[in-house]
Amino acid sequence: MNASPRDDRTGDDMGELVPFPCPSTAPASSTGTTLIASANEFDTSGPVVGAELLTDVEQHQRVNAHRWTELVAAIVPARWQNRDHHNHVRAELVLRAVRVPLRYPVAVARGSVTAARAWWAWVSVRDFYDAAKQAQQLAQRFQDIQRYRVRRRWSTLGVLVVGGAGLLVTGMVVGPIVWWATAAPVSVALAVAGRRKDGSPGRKNVFPGTRTLAWTINGDVLVEAFQAAKVIGPKDGLAFFLRPRRDGDGWAVIIDLPAGRKASSAIAARESLASALGVDETQLILERVRGTGGHAGRVAVWVADTDPLAQPPLRSYLEDLPGLSIWDGVTIGATARGKVVTVAFCWTAWLIAGLPRYGKSNLLRLFLVAACLDPHTRIYAVDLKDGADFNPLRPVAHRLLIASAEGAETEETLLRLLALLIELESEVLDRYKRFKDMPEADVPEGKITRDLVAAGMPWLVLAIDECQLAFEELGSDTKQVKDLRRVIVDKVSWLVRKGPAAGATVLLATQKPDRGAIPTRLRDNISSRAALRLPTQQSNDMALGTGKGAAGVDATKFTERHRGAAWLLADDLSGVGASEGVIIRAAKLDLAPTRAAAEAGRERRVALGLLTGDAAGHHPPAPVEGATLTELVAASGAGAEPVDAESVESVESEAARPMPEVLELLADVLGEDETGIVATADLAQRIGWDPKALGEALRRLDIPAPRPPRQRIGGSKHPVSAQSIDAIIAAIVEHDGK
């Protein structure tokens, strides 16, 4: 319908007729600027739904009103704008109103006790008495204290007499209403004084425990906690960059440590801080604030209301079978604070470690399901425990090896695994050759690109579950089995180093992350780590890196309730700090959705003509024969044996004595050009040890200390314990020679 002008608007007061829903626009100019049509060029071909005449003043008022609405929406907390929150508050108010008749008399009684205690402290001059006692002047001030006590007692008696007489006379003149008018505000004041408040001594806490979180996150308590944990000195304080506030299901605060104190020290002392704050260490999350708004001494503290890791399992978005690309990373779960965790799949290798039945295979399955849903991947899946975890991958896996690598089947399974690795190695080598013949525009960095993958060079994914069954040499192994294991370790190590540039990712999962199960030459090249619950500090350091346990990244702190919880060290694509270590809850993905993902991945590959290998009905490579194995062993030097038979026993006895752990750690942190002496505390900090424990370990190894053993180093005011770097390096070289 057409709008009619208002009767009281004429001449210049008339507004413009604004058509609805929108005017037509002229085509963009050559400079890219869109030209708006003039008032006479509106498209009037369609019906006019509605219109209104507005003056410039009214239009300006409406714009201002809209801006104020947006400003208020931005300032007011989001939960105050939530209808569900309004309903919750309304229900809470109604519930409290119902409870008032029951709770009010109890609060008045508690307030009367509180008021009586406060009155007695005032009458007995407790503040003056305590101050004199602390100043050790109680004897000199006793007469003054006694005089104040007598004065306050007479003052109390005077107030009671005058007030009582006044109320009595007024009540006789006016009536009983005076007593009600006096009793009402007095009872309200007593009820307020006796209310149950967080942190009040002798009153019920809102949360379980001796202290509530509202009390725990208080500034003074935080300072005392950091002092008790020895993160800061006894006279140091904290600066609040962001004051305590509710954040999700917990309290959050950002603090600045005193000058010279590092955030890494606070993170390493997480258990001590949790004890000082009166919460479980799983409820306390400490993160260093990085970027423009952070520095080395700024710490983000979050204290959860309850254990955030002992919650029901998360549902994975992969169950919805989305179309995805592994180039964009894989979302594997969420942090303890509920932030989504997305990690890199390409350009890295993964080591997943954890005790049985804590989610290790489930976490590996998340990566494999993501690879299934991306049709531009080729999956090589190996399950050496002969279980059912990888069975759903049959419709899509290029190679699928499910067999036992224990007992009588060990040699046959390892030969089949070696054949699979040789096929994968050949594919990687062939790609490197093809890169040499390609134009530089196609391979600008000499590596695979996203366009090459989309053009038919799929990303290769090798996943080995229970990889320690293939890598670890056992005393019962025959010579051929030992040679097989060494060659397999060499092949996998080569794929970890060379594979990413050619488009290959290696995923390893193990329940035994020790030196024998994951050899150093393989482990040191794996950049992404995930550790679920682990039994010892040694296994934690093997899974996550040397010294990580001392730095606070400790998977041994997980309990039997924390299934699916893991420490993550990986390339961070979601801004949660995974590159420095973050606790996550992995999403749960069962076999049924895994099979559905495999079927969907098969359909996508068939449509693109990318279904290959076992899934397409092609025969797998034949197990490696004895002659081929001999050539591989000779090429890698894995089967080299001592010629002198008499020296075999001595060599084996020396091999049975590995280098002490302290020397291995020191070998990793000492530079080739380091000489002279170093403070024991500095050396201990490098490897994450206690200085006293390090000094005792070096003494047990008969490593001589410098003379004198305590010296002034680096301008220290007092002599400190020192160690000789030359003596330590000599001991390391001696053990290497053995």
Image: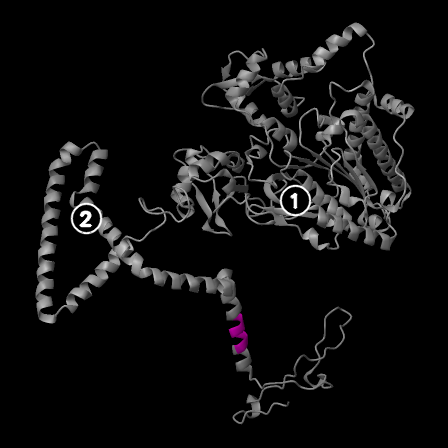
Q: Which residue does the image show at 48% across and 62% down from the upper left? A: 85
Q: Where residue 119 sits: x, y (%)?
A: 19, 48
Between the C-alphas of marks 2 and 1, the distance is 60 Å
For label 2, the residue is: 119
For label 1, the residue is: 572
Q: Is residue 659 above or below residue 379?
A: above
Q: What's under tag 1, amino acid-wise?
A: Asp
Q: Which residues are magenta?
A: 62-67
Element carrying mark 2 = helix
Q: Is residue 8 left or right of residue 97?
A: right
Labels 2, 1: front one: 2
Q: Please state which of residues 521 and 306 is positioned toward the viewer in this rendering.
A: 306
Q: Where residue 56 sits: x, y (%)?
A: 55, 82
Q: Is residue 400 left or right of residue 513?
A: right
Q: Is residue 196 above or below residue 171?
A: above
Earlier in the chain: of badge 2 and badge 1, it is 2
Q: Which residue does the image show at 67% across and 32% down from the upper left? A: 511
Q: Which residue does the image show at 35% across and 47% down from the upper left? A: 204
